Amino acid sequence: MIKFINSKLQQIVKFFSFPPITMKNMNESSRRRTRKAYVQEPVLENDCFYPHIPLSANLLQDSSDEQEGAVHDGSLKGDYANIALLMFLYVLQGIPLGLAGSIPMLLSSRKVSYKEQALFSFVYWPFSMKLVWAPLVDSIYSSCFGRRKTWLVPTQYLIGIFMFTLSGHVTDVLGDSDSTAEVNILLLTCIFFMLNFLAATQDIAVDGWALTMLSRKNVGWASTCNSVGQTTGYFLGNVVFLALESAEFCNKYLRFEPQPVGILTLAGFLYFWGIVFFVTTTLVWILKKESDDLDMDPDQGIVNTYKTLYKVMKLPAVLSYCGILLTCKIGFAAADALTGLKLIEAGVRKETLALFAVPMVPLQIVLALVISKYTAGPRPLAVFLKAMPYRVLLGIIYALGVNWAYKVQVVPGEFPWYFYAVILCIYAIHQVFVYSMFVATMAFAAKISDPAIGGTYMTLLNTLSNLGGNWPSTLALWLVDSLTWKRCSSSGDSCNSPPDVQACKAAGGSCVTSIDGYYIESAFCVVVGLLWIKWKANKLRHLDTLGLSEWTCR
């Protein structure tokens, strides 16, 4: 049974890659021919308007058929405890990521402006920028303390400290202490930015430690630990938290007598996980010994790593592809960044949106298996080009869905079952195109990466891919308020600034939206996305046909 599960998981991740945060030794030509290159790429966020579940994937590359067979023989003897530890470390990593994904929904229910949501969206950026400090984590360490524990232990202690501290003040930060208090969005952003920065640093250390913690024949299981552990942590910090934090959900499904609050509070959740981080980090520090294996996890050095990145960046083909990665997601910015928040604004409960992620898990596994069959050939970007127009056009469907939400409510906040069924179906269709593009780009990156520097190559490409998704989403959130026009119901005057809102309330009226910037952005993004396809389609096809020599550092 274990062999069967292992083989299926290896099929799922075969065409994905995750750049190794540990940079490989490029100086020994003999290693280039025979040594494994364990490639890990940074966490990629699921491009959808529901919880940003990370898309993580790994690729174990080996030029030796004998070594390949050893990796896939399914024997875990001697590594059960190590796999359990790696899985748990990745679960810990997913907790702050999940919490960061749940905060925008909490902010939306507190009527925070979209410009403030845009400011908070910067908390997702650290995992898109790990490449900047990853060489430091790989090269600066104490030998007596342990190469990876030098960073893992203090990083996890700091995450615990942040969670402990925030648990005592989160009520004030979210403006829940009294009716006149406001959300301190700047402080909240700084705290979660640091939490995600620390989680990204922990990810670098754990990715590197996985190479030496597991025996060589089982090092491929690091991909499974990463994917399963991080997704589990994210699920706990996002879907489970939002459901149990909701009084409506708990009263409807988990209680016999209604209560005004949920089973969990954000303060209690942070306090609990702060304790878990402290206790488990101490146990790992004291009980788990670290061993070095320079063949599996060589120390290339800071200078050599940055030199390698510079050489890769100078390649004309890489420059063209980087431009594509940084701009290809403009066409989905409004749909990905705003649709979920607009549905909450329309009355859909945040915990309902969070629970939509549950049935998507088996769908995503099946999609990964099916789509990888079509991206395994010599032209993986053909799948990307076929999926992209449909994903762009789904922006119109999402906008219509948000508009329909206002009209189909039985009473405010209550929707008929068929509304949820339609939205769930649209979301599932959306996932087909999201995963088609995701798997295609991962397959293409694995195809073009120079095996001698696969880790550096993959880290660079996927950092740019993440940035290409982050900046359009942040910009879309920032501009939507400026593109929205509101009028006072009593006087008909403008209601677009805080003083106007106060004046309208004083006159006994309320602000009514006459033009929603979300629809303007949705239309703009669809047009830009279709024009981008027309502009860049031939360039993508050309890059897909280039030989490996065009992508190789000489």
Image (spheres, rainbow, N blue to C red):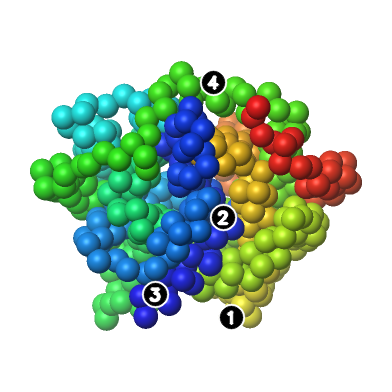
Circles 3 and 2: CB atoms closer than 8 Å = no
Q: Nearer the viewer, mark 4 or mark 1?
A: 4
- Judge whether 454 appears above or below 190 on screen: below
Q: Residue at x 37, y 69 (%)?
A: 74
Q: Quadrant of residue 196?
A: top left
- Judge whether 33 appears above or below 131 on screen: below
Q: Residue at x 62, y 24 (%)?
A: 311
Q: Nearer the viewer, mark 2 or mark 4?
A: 4
Task: Give the class, few, some or many, for how many residues have Cα within 10 Å of label 4's Cα (few <14, many ≥20).
Answer: few
Q: Is residue 236 visible?
A: yes
Q: Position of residue 286 (x, y in %)?
A: 10, 43
Residue 3: image tag: 3
Q: In which quadrant is the N terminus drawn? A: bottom left
Q: Position of residue 260 (x, y in %)?
A: 30, 64
**In-image side of 544 versus 178 (left or right):** right
Closer to the camera, 391 or 50?
391
Q: Nearer the viewer, mark 3 or mark 2?
A: 3
Circles 4 and 1: CB atoms closer than 8 Å = no
Closer to the camera, 423 or 359?
359
Mark 4 sits on what residue? 307
Report the number of numbered marks. 4
Mark 1 sits on what residue? 417
Q: Amino acid at mark 1?
A: Trp
Mark 2 sits on what residue? 16
Element assignment for label 2: loop
Closer to the camera, 309 or 252?
309
